[in-house]
């Protein structure tokens, strides 16, 4: 319908606007998290402008961003979201182990093996370290998938979920990056590393919940055990590079 098309266009414009406010994904680790209030205002402003825009322009005059023009994603592409979700669950279930690095081959107490907390792995699981990560530029994939949402009511929920996903995954990335510098910064120390790492975990938890909502709205099943294992191996390989 006309208004459904307008809402889909708004989602594309909103996400494009957010992307212009931050560096590319691989460089996003130095970007500050978006203000929740500012992001929410931006979305409301766009939505309130829709009626006026609809009166002045026909749908044929609305130019969709390049991401939307890429077309509806294939089932294989949508499977990246399922893989990414499974890997986030794996990360959360093995948080202490995956965010701790020790001297390779060392046997003994952690303090004797030079073990330190290393939050960089969080960036890998969130899709910020490699183009091969399933969640790399997941927000753009989500925009392309908006045409697959079943109803107008679900489209509203989908628009909100994609908006929140973009902000939450950025926040998780920024907190992980900040944690990695916790000891180097003036007045820092291990306690600062732990504090920001805990904040990063909170953002990852919420990101995973939002991703599951998006999967449900797109009717995407969770990844199979084989697919999940393959995704974990890919992240670990990227982490060793």
Image (cartoon, grey):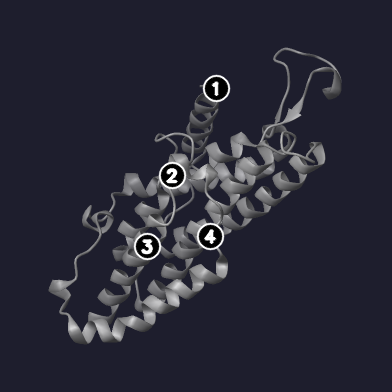
- Compare marks 3 and 2 and give the one earlier in the sequence: 3
Q: Secondary structure at mark 2?
A: helix
User: Given contact means CB atoms under 8 Å apart, are the residues at marks 3 and 2 in contact?
Assistant: no
**Image coords of residue 130 (percent x, y):** 44, 34
Q: CA distance from mark 2 to mark 1?
A: 20 Å
Which residue position is annotated with label 2?
25
Q: Earlier in the sequence, mark 1 or mark 4?
A: 4
Q: How many residues crowd mark 4 within 10 Å: few (<14), some (14–19), many (20+)?
A: some
Residue under label 3: 17
The answer to whether residue 134 of the structure is visible from this angle is no
| Of callouts 3 and 1, the N-terminal one | 3
Cα distance, mark 3 to mark 2?
Answer: 14 Å
Is 112 positioned to the left or the right of 31 in the image? Answer: right
Mark drawn on residue 34:
4
Q: Residue at x 46, y 64 (%)?
A: 163
Q: Nearer the viewer, residue 106 or 87?
A: 106
Q: Secondary structure at mark 3?
A: helix
x and y, in percent, of residue 87 in the image: 55, 41
User: Foreground residue, 223 or 81?
Assistant: 81
Disc 3 + disc 1, Cβ < 8 Å: no
Answer few, some or many: residues within 10 Å of disc 2's Cα (few below 14, many 20 plus, some between 14 and 19).
some
Placement of 175 over or under 18, stated as above or below? above
Of labels 2 and 4, the one closer to you: 4
- Mark 1 or 4, which is nearer the eye? 4
Vertically, is 180 above or below 105?
Answer: below
Camera-side mark, 2 or 1: 2
Q: How packed is label 3: few (under 14 Cα within 10 Å), some, or many (20 or more)? A: some
Instruction: Locate the N terminus by quadrant.
Output: bottom left
């Amino acid at each position: 319908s006309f208004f459904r098309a307008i809402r889909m266009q708004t989602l594309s414009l909103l996400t494009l606007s957010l992307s212009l406010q931050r560096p590319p994904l691989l460089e996003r680790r130095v970007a500050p998290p978006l203000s929740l209030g500012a992001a929410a205002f931006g979305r409301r402003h766009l939505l309130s402008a829709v009626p006026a825009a609809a009166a002045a322009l026909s749908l044929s005059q609305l130019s969709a961003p390049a991401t939307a023009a890429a077309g509806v994603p294939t089932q294989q592409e949508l499977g990246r979201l399922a893989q990414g979700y499974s890997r986030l669950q794996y990360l959360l279930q093995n948080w202490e182990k995956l965010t701790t690095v020790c001297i390779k081959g060392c046997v003994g107490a952690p303090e004797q093996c030079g073990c330190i907390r290393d939050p960089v792995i969080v960036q890998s699981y969130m899709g910020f370290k490699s183009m091969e990560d399933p969640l790399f530029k997941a927000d753009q994939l989500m925009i392309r998938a908006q045409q697959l949402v079943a109803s107008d009511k679900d489209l509203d929920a989908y628009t909100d979920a994609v908006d929140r996903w973009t902000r939450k995954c950025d926040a998780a990335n920024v907190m992980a990056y900040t944690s990695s510098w916790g000891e180097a910064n003036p007045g820092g120390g291990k306690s600062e590393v732990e504090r920001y790492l805990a904040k990063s975990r909170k953002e990852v938890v919420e990101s995973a919940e939002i991703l599951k909502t998006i999967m449900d709205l797109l009717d995407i099943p969770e990844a199979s055990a084989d697919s999940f294992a393959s995704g974990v191996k890919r992240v670990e390989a990227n982490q060793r590079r």
